[in-house]
Image (cartoon, rainbow, N blue to C red):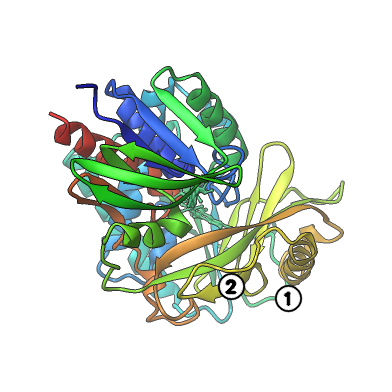
């Protein structure tokens, strides 16, 4: 009898990490992707922030902060383990400035208390050696500090900002990470990457699964002994075809645009900024001069219980979303005046919640319910955030490895 055939569905960062974790343990893996190339959906079209938990200040239980910290602290060490040491210093942004907006749904005091808990959590995790010391190639030391509004503030002077916090939180440039991982997938002798294949569904059979696929307009099947479903926006639908029940907490799907701009020459270079707490925006200067921008009320173009049915690739919609987002952000950040739009691309975000983030009670402020589940040979991986993909990849790889013993 041959070795069990492991098939991973979806070659975003999550599927890639599961494949790498398995290959690192010596297992051969087939990785199926519907797009022409891997790492070209949400794992490319994002902000790249490796969350330390600041954004989830409204989760008073601290569970989301813990989950983000755990994911963030093993993000680089796991990818380094699978790929060799990666140049994090070339891909990493400066630290984020958290700016408390005039109509923030959380007061500065509440945010201060939450960030203080975060520091305590980090110390506790370090003490118990639950985490690796590295965060994107360097050690965390001060994590965050309250900052006054000084002459260098990037915000318009006429605005009544409530407060500022400097942090050690950073983003990586997803373009560089994706390019490096694509290369790793193509070169790895134990990984067979098959792109351009759409997974329609699967059937459970004696000792395994039959996957129903579409390739170049033709229906095909592929038999697998073990399957890891990492298809993100299509995950719940594919799970249902093998009888996996939907989660008790309903999923919501949002479409959000990744917009890249270039500042006008002569403007002060921006720093990474996250505006809190509510439906505001982010700015992330990349090392090559491009700047990621988002303004939530304009960038978030879909919210629903089902994945978006229309194409995400409409260039006119993407351009119009970018123009409106830039125009809104220019009201806050004068250094964006005259900025030029370089690109705009939509990505899907899957989470739990029935109301959007302007609601302080929204489940979107508590992101602790994602992760890996297994059902007799079928693993389903809800990535949650880019931040957690390597951690969940390692967990899935370890579980599948155990199941094969
Ligand atoms: C604008 C934006 C900003 C974001 N910012 C951040 C951030 O700063 N920090 C953070 O932690 N997270 C962020 N996220 C979330 C993050 O991008 C996702 O959590 C993460 O990329 C999900 O990874 P994934 O591999 O599960 O999904 P994907 O990258 O979408 O990969 C899934 C893959 O499965 C393939 N697929 C789907 N269905 C099928 C099928 N039926 N058959 C075959 N293949 C299929 C898709 O083509 C895709 O390649 C952001 C998301 C967006 C959209």
Q: Which residue is mark 2?
A: 302
Circle nearer the viewer, 2 or 1: 2
Q: Tag 2, which secondary structure?
A: strand
Q: Nearer the viewer, residue 153 or 193?
A: 193
x 57%, y 49%: residue:
41
Please state, as top left, top right, bottom left or bottom right, where the N terminus lies in the image: top left
Image vertical order of residue 248 relative to residue 269, above or below: below
Say whether disc 2 or disc 1 marks the residue closer to the N-terminus: 1
Q: Position of residue 304 (x, y in %)?
A: 50, 76
Residue 158 disc label: 1
Choose between 21 and 51: the one closer to the eye: 21
Q: Does the rendering let one see residue 184?
A: yes
Q: How many marks?
A: 2
Indicate left or right for 85 with 329 as reference.
left
- Of 54 and 43, the residue lying toward us: 43
For the residues labelled 2 and 1, the Cα–Cα distance comes to 32 Å
Residue at image coords 77%, 50%: 268
- Image quarter of the C terminus: top left
Q: Quadrant of residue 201?
A: bottom left
SS at mark 1?
loop
């Amino acid at each position: 009898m041959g070795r069990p055939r492991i098939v991973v569905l979806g070659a975003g960062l999550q599927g890639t990490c599961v494949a790498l974790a398995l290959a690192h343990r010596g297992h051969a893996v087939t990785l199926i992707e519907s797009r022409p190339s891997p790492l070209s959906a949400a794992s490319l079209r994002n902000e790249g922030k490796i969350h330390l938990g600041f954004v989830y200040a409204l989760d008073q239980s601290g569970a989301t902060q813990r989950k983000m910290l755990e994911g963030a602290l093993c993000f680089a060490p796991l990818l380094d383990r699978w790929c060799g040491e990666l140049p994090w210093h070339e891909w990493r942004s400066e630290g984020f400035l958290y700016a408390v907006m005039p109509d923030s749904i959380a007061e500065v005091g509440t945010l201060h208390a939450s960030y203080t808990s975060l520091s305590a959590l980090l110390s506790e995790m370090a003490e118990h050696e639950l985490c690796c010391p590295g965060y994107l190639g360097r050690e965390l030391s001060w994590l965050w500090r309250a900052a006054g509004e000084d002459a260098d503030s990037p915000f318009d002077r006429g605005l009544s900002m409530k407060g500022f916090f400097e942090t050690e939180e950073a983003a990586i440039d997803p373009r560089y990470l994706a390019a490096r991982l694509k290369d790793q997938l193509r070169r790895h002798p134990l990984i067979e990457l098959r792109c351009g294949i759409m997974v329609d569904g699967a059937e459970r059979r004696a000792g395994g699964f039959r996957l129903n696929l579409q390739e170049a307009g033709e229906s095909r099947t592929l038999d697998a002994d073990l399957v890891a479903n990492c298809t993100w926006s299509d995950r719940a639908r594919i799970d249902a075809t093998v009888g996996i029940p939907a989660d008790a907490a309903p999923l919501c799907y949002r479409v959000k645009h990744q917009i890249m701009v270039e500042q006008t020459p002569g403007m002060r270079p921006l720093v990474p900024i996250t505006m809190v707490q509510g439906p505001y925006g982010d700015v992330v200067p990349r090392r090559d001069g491009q700047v990621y921008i988002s303004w939530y009320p304009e960038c978030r173009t879909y919210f629903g219980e089902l994945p978006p049915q229309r194409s995400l690739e409409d260039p006119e919609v993407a351009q119009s979303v970018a123009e409106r987002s830039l125009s809104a952000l220019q009201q806050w950040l004068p250094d964006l005046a005259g900025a030029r739009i370089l690109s705009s691309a939509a990505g899907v975000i899957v989470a739990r919640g029935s109301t959007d983030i302007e609601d302080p009670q929204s489940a979107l402020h508590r992101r602790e319910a994602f992760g890996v589940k297994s059902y007799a040979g079928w693993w389903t991986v809800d990535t949650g955030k880019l931040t957690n993909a390597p951690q969940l990849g390692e967990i899935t790889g370890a579980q599948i490895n155990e199941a094969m013993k």
